[in-house]
């Protein structure tokens, strides 16, 4: 593979990652495919280069330009757990808009134990283990008794 075709391939993959971020709001996971390309694998390989000190500064700056945080790499990705949390949170909002009050611990709504879920979020909060973004969403709904 010539140098020019390697550069073109890298630029193509980088632009796909950039488009993915703009469309999805997060960076691709290793298994993510976007527009028939393995953008997650490309990003994973670039992160390995970074960890091994082999990612050149220009490429690092390009990733930073699209919002990649090399100081806290995990913060760049939305996990399946984050997606499930958001779905349950949305269901909680739907429940509260229909019923007009928070669920009790034993409430099941649309086959999801949202009362138990909310109880667990409160327990995580009391232990100081609730992620800040999640705290902010629950606190906005006035569902956490103790302020941080």
Image (cartoon, rainbow, N blue to C red):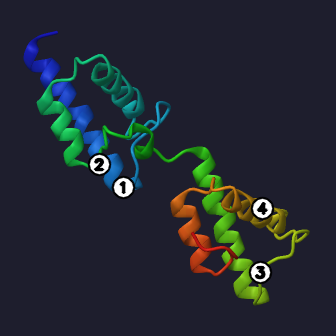
**In the figure, residue 74 lies in which quadrant?**
top left
The secondary structure type at the circle numbered 3 is loop
Image: 23 above or below 7: below
Name the residue tied to disc 3. 102
Taking the spot 20% from the left edge, 33% from the top edge, the residue there is 60
Tell me, yes or no, whether the two marked residues, 2 and 3, touch with CB atoms within 8 Å: no
**Is label 2 or label 3 in front?**
3
Image: 137 above or below 65: below
Percent position of residue 49, x then y? 29, 20
Taking the spot 13% from the left edge, 23% from the top edge, the residue there is 7
Taking the spot 23% from the left edge, 40% from the top edge, the residue there is 63
The secondary structure type at the circle numbered 4 is helix
Tell me, yes or no, whether the two marked residues, 2 and 1, touch with CB atoms within 8 Å: yes
Name the residue tied to disc 4. 117
**In the figure, residue 44 lies in which quadrant?**
top left
Taking the spot 75% from the left edge, 60% from the top edge, the residue there is 123
């Amino acid at each position: 593979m010539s140098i020019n075709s390697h550069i073109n391939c890298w630029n193509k993959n980088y632009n796909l990652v950039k488009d993915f971020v703009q469309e999805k709001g997060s960076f691709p996971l290793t298994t993510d495919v976007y527009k028939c390309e393995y953008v997650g694998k490309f990003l994973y390989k670039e992160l390995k280069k970074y960890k091994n000190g082999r990612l050149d500064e220009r490429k690092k700056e390009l990733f930073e330009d699209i919002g990649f945080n090399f100081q806290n790499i995990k913060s760049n990705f939305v996990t399946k757990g984050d997606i499930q949390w958001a779905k349950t949170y949305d269901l909680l909002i739907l429940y509260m808009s229909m019923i007009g009050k928070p669920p009790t611990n034993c409430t099941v709504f649309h086959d999801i134990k949202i009362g138990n879920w909310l109880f667990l979020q409160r327990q995580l909060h009391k232990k100081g283990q609730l992620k800040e973004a999640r705290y902010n969403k629950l606190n906005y709904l006035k569902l956490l008794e103790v302020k941080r």
